[in-house]
Image (tube, rainbow, N blue to C red):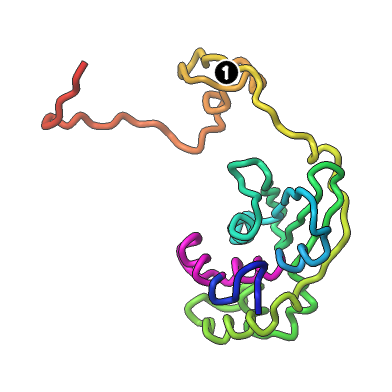
Amino acid sequence: MNICSYTFEEYIERIQCFHGFVAPGVIIGGFMIDLAYQHLPEEGLFDAISETAHCLPDAIQLLTPCTVGNGWLRVINMGRYAMTLYDKYNGKGIRVFLDSAKVESWPEIKSWFFNLKPKKEQDSQLLMKQIKEAGANICSIQQVKIAPRFLKKLHRTGFAICPSCKEAYPLADGEICLGCQGEAPYVVSQIPHNPGTTHEE
């Protein structure tokens, strides 16, 4: 049993190293990506969309050239366990999703996917066994074409110094940076001075 160019065991090792632990969602994601590639041309440059922020983006980054950092992977969090690989020029691609109806035949996968019991009560060995046995059979595919607005590449525009925080930011964000517009995910506080350290001017 292979997942793209890896054996199942090799892929599990890569998950452990990259994701931090062997998550069921990343394993299933591997089968999803492998299934998508089976229905795509062998030649071509493909971008990816993940419809969830949980686990699936890591499978995409492990098995394709698409990463968040290089801009070839977009995470559009719609809460659906689905991903699409598509031609980066014409937008034609394959969408793969975890099919709720097909999951019905696999009780432990269903319990995990629908969160029917606490994690500590799940049978992790049985879950892994069922995932390996089920493979891509719990998934369905669709031919899709990506909407034109998602094919546009975001290019870096001019930068300015924010008059409020004095940090550089894209001019397209407005008169002040997004952080100073209230979008920052934190509240800044002063770091206490340690009298035991010295600072060179």
**Residue displayed at 82% across by 60% down:** 40
| For residue 175, side relative to residue 95 (left or right) | left
Q: Which residue is depicted at the point 76% across and 72% down?
A: 139
Label 1 packing within 10 angstroms: few (<14), some (14-19), many (20+) = many
Most extreme residue toward the front is 43
Q: Main secondary structure of the magenta part?
A: helix
Numbered range of the magenta stretch? 11-32
Query: Where residue 41 appears, x then y in whole percent?
Result: 83, 58
- Quarter containing the C terminus: top left
Question: Is residue 13 found inside the magenta-colored segment of the image?
Answer: yes
Amino acid type, residue under disc 1 in the picture: Ile
Location of residue 93 in the rendering, given as x and y in whole percent from the top left corner: 83, 54
Image location (x, y in percent) of residue 76: 70, 48
Q: For this rendering, which residue is in front, 102 or 37?
A: 37
Depicted 180 relative to depicted 135: above or below: above
Side of 36 where 124 appears, left or right: left
**Picture quadrant where residue 171 is located:** top right
Vertical placement of residue 60 versus 146, above or below: below
Question: Pointer 1: what residue?
Answer: 176
Closest to the observer: 45 or 186?
45
For the point 46% across and 16% down, the residue is 166
Exactly how many numbered labels are in the figure? Answer: 1
Give residue 109's position: percent from left, percent from top: 65, 79
Q: Residue at x 75, y 50 (%)?
A: 46
Quarter holding the N terminus? bottom right
As helix, strand or loop, the secondary structure at mark 1 comes to loop
